[in-house]
Image (cartoon, rainbow, N blue to C red):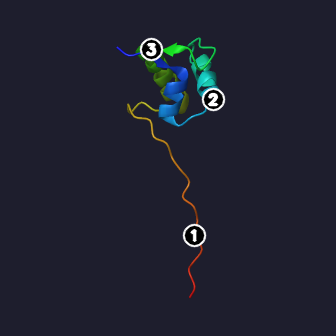
């Protein structure tokens, strides 16, 4: 089992470390810095919290991105 830090996990998720620390704290996972280790159980607690917060019971978490509007091309 490999040790993963909060900073490494944040990088995997393309999220700022501070945002992830805030979400972990809200989920009841006590982490204070990006150098703290994060376990599989911590990740599961975070996932369960986010699913409950976002109202998702489907087992997947989706991220929606806004599509940029493009101007029509003129010649």
Question: Can residue 26 be seen here?
Answer: yes
Distance of mark 2 from mark 3, alpha carbons?
18 Å
Residue 50 visible in the displayed image: no
Mark toward the viewer: 3 or 1: 3
Relative to 21, does residue 75 appear above or below in the rendering? Answer: below
Task: Give the residue number, with chain letter if any, for mark 2.
Answer: 19
- Element at label 3: loop
Q: Quadrant of residue 25?
A: top right
**What's the mark number on residue 57?**
none
Quadrant location, the N terminus: top left
Farthest residue, direction bottom: 75
Residue named by callout 3: 39
Q: Residues within 10 Å of mark 1 (few under 14, many from 20)?
A: few
**Residue assigned mark 1:** 70
Q: Is residue 73 above or below residue 8?
A: below
Residue at point 64% right, 23% down?
22
- Residue drawn at 56 percent across, 88 percent down: 75
């Amino acid at each position: 089992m490999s040790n993963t830090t909060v900073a490494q996990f944040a990088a995997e998720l393309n999220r700022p470390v501070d945002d992830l620390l805030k979400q972990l704290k809200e989920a009841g996972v006590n982490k204070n810095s990006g150098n703290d280790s994060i376990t599989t159980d911590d990740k599961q607690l975070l996932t369960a919290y986010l699913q409950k917060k976002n109202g998702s019971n489907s087992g997947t978490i989706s991220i929606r991105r806004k599509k940029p509007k493009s101007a029509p091309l003129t010649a």
